[in-house]
Image (cartoon, rainbow, N blue to C red):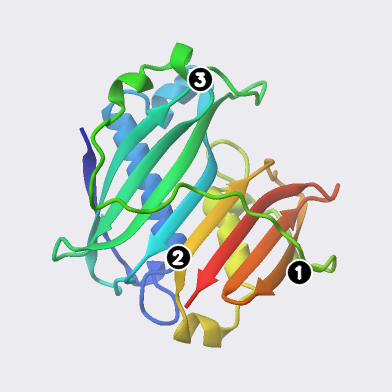
């Protein structure tokens, strides 16, 4: 069984082109995941009450069309699989004509809120009972891919993590990394190109008051990013494929 949720695009969720920004699409996808989990009894509020938290390991998004501000989109979501460590949740994004305009796939794990270590999904939740085994023929994208960064060792810029970057899990919000990467693009790229595929790998938590260095490299139509903490450890790697 799948769940579907509607999202209205306010101007604050659009970029300079007046179309929804990629980070807003990502936020809607994560919201849909959270709402679906809540409906099925393993949402973030329940998990926090038991000292647990969902964390995203990888995200992939493919977009054919970016809807404009003031439009409404629908996001259908379902759990594809569940192992002891990871679970895959997929998404279809529809416009107001019920046409598929995008797809997404996400990889999730669960951590103990105090130890910050992974817990066994099969022992901690009944998530395996919610797996949808029937493949939706409209869903055609590949799962999230590993991002390999090969680029310069001089960062584009450094961002100090502030209060507004932190989410309920007390680490940097998943979409903030993407926002910092997109902020390295030019206004011309935002206005005249679009990201047709996004891959994000989350590797290490970024925390309040840390300085995060954003490194980037361009290869043909791909822009790759590595976001590192003060110790030089990669917190996140991102690949944008533009057209």
Residue 76 x/y as whole percent: 25, 47
Q: Which mark is residue 22?
A: 2
Number of residues whose C-alpha sits closer than 10 Å to that of mark 3, classed few (under 14), some (14–19) or many (20 or more)? some
Element under disc 1: strand
Element under disc 3: loop
Residue 113 x/y as whole percent: 59, 24
The answer to whether 10 appears left or right of 72 in the picture is right
Read off the residue under disc 3.
84
For image coordinates 28% across by 26% down, the residue present is 40
Of circles 2 and 3, which is in front? 3
Q: Which quadrant of the structure image shows residue 8?
A: bottom left
For marks 2 and 1 on the same chain, the one whose residue lies earlier in the sequence: 2
The answer to whether 74 appears left or right of 211 in the picture is left
Read off the residue under disc 1.
157
Q: Is residue 150 above or below residue 118?
A: below
Using the numbered discs, state the Cα–Cα distance from disc 2 to disc 3 in whole angstroms: 31 Å
Number of residues whose C-alpha sits closer than 10 Å to that of mark 2, classed few (under 14), some (14–19) or many (20 or more)? many
For marks 1 and 3 on the same chain, the one whose residue lies earlier in the sequence: 3
Of circles 2 and 1, which is in front? 2
Using the numbered discs, state the Cα–Cα distance from disc 2 to disc 1 in whole angstroms: 21 Å
Q: Nearer the viewer, residue 5 or 141?
A: 141
Q: Which quadrant of the structure image shows residue 114?
A: top right
Residue 173 x/y as whole percent: 56, 48
């Amino acid at each position: 069984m799948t769940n579907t949720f509607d999202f209205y695009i306010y101007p604050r969720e659009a970029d300079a082109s007046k179309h929804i920004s990629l980070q807003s699409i990502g936020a809607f996808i994560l919201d849909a995941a959270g709402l679906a989990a809540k409906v099925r009894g393993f949402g973030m509020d329940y998990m926090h009450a038991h000292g647990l938290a969902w964390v995203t390991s990888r995200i992939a998004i493919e977009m054919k069309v970016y809807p404009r501000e003031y439009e409404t989109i629908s996001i259908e979501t379902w759990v594809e699989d569940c192992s002891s460590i990871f679970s895959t949740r997929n998404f279809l994004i529809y416009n107001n004509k019920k046409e598929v305009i995008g797809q997404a796939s996400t990889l999730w794990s669960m951590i103990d809120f105090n130890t910050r270590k992974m817990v066994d999904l099969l022992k901690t939740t009944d998530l395996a009972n919610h797996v949808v085994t029937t493949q939706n023929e409209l869903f055609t994208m590949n799962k999230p891919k590993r991002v390999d960064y090969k680029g310069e060792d001089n960062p584009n810029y450094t961002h100090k993590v502030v209060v507004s970057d932190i989410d309920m899990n007390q680490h940097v919000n998943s979409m903030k990394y993407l926002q910092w990467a997109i902020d390295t693009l030019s206004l011309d790229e935002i206005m005249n190109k679009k990201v047709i595929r996004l891959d994000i790998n989350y590797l290490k938590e970024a925390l309040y008051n840390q300085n995060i260095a954003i490194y980037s490299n361009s290869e043909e139509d791909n822009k790759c990013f590595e976001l590192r903490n003060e110790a030089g450890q990669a917190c996140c790697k991102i690949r944008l494929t533009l057209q």
